[in-house]
Image: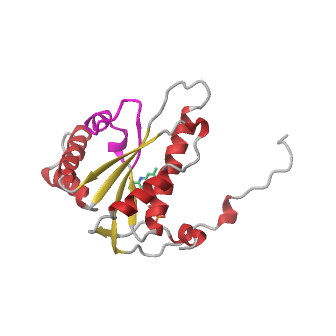
Amino acid sequence: MEAIENLMSRRSPAKLAEPAPSAEALSRAMAAAVRAPDHGKLKPWRFVIIESDARAAFGEVMARCLKRQQPDATEEMLTREREKAFRAPTIVVAVAKIQAQHPKIPEVEQLLAAGAATQNFWLALHAQGYGALWKTGAPAYDAQVKRELGLAETDQIVGFMYVGSIAQPAMDQKRPEPEHFIERWTRPAA
Ligand SMILES: Cc1cc2nc3c(=O)[nH]c(=O)nc-3n(C[C@H](O)[C@H](O)[C@H](O)COP(=O)(O)O)c2cc1C
């Protein structure tokens, strides 16, 4: 696929399904991810792959998180939360491995590099015909979720990337006009 066409056609599908991206496709997407811009060559990204049966355990992690956040969550809500783990054959947790107080590279730049890697990952999957959903929500910021995923306290979850084959494409939504976001600067403000 043409690079620009790939960028312009990426969207979150309405529904994902089996088969998961092949090992080769996933590894190509990872290779694209680690080519992201990276100030100081810190490689501040990690990708935690959760697939097949491990998704049930991940669903439990999510349900426990919901229960912590909303102690009066009903059984129905908890079941719905568990089932989210099965909305794609593979979940890739994109993580920013933050070095706090790095002498040269601010934390925000490390987070941006991990975000760029995550977008590269998504675009590379898209170029190979697979779909992805980028999700965060409360679990991405929950210390216990991080612990249960084997992450360090200083790690930041950039996104839970649900990946698979596209069972139902997204409805085409109107995209913003780029000129609304562009300003020209000519001199310092008074
Ligand atoms: C950091 C980040 C976190 C996001 N978290 C969520 C989320 O938790 N739930 C959600 O529905 N969309 C979330 N989104 C937005 C979707 O992934 C998606 O990009 C958006 O709905 C626009 O749809 P599109 O991918 O078709 O452009 C997030 C996006 C980013 C960049």
Q: Is residue 156 magenta?
A: yes
Image quadrant, ligand 1 = bottom left
Q: Left of 28 or right of it: where is 104? A: right
Q: Left of 98 or right of it: where is 88? A: left
Tell me residue 101's x, y (percent): 54, 24
Q: Where 179 sits versus 32, above or below?
A: below
Residue lying furthest front: 24
Tell me residue 116's x, y (percent): 53, 50
Q: Left of 158 or right of it: where is 15? A: left
Q: Which residues are magenta?
A: 137-159
Residue in the image at 25% along x and 41% along y: 65
Residue in the image at 71% along x and 58% along y: 182
The quadrant where residue 171 appears:
bottom left
Residue in the image at 85% along x and 50% along y: 186
Q: Is residue 148 magenta?
A: yes
Q: Where 132 sits versus 147, above or below?
A: below
Q: Where 97 sits versus 86, above or below?
A: above
Assign the C terminus to one quadrant of the image.
top right
Q: Nearer the viewer, residue 72 or 44?
A: 44
Residue 11 visible, this angle: no
The quadrant where residue 146 appears:
top left
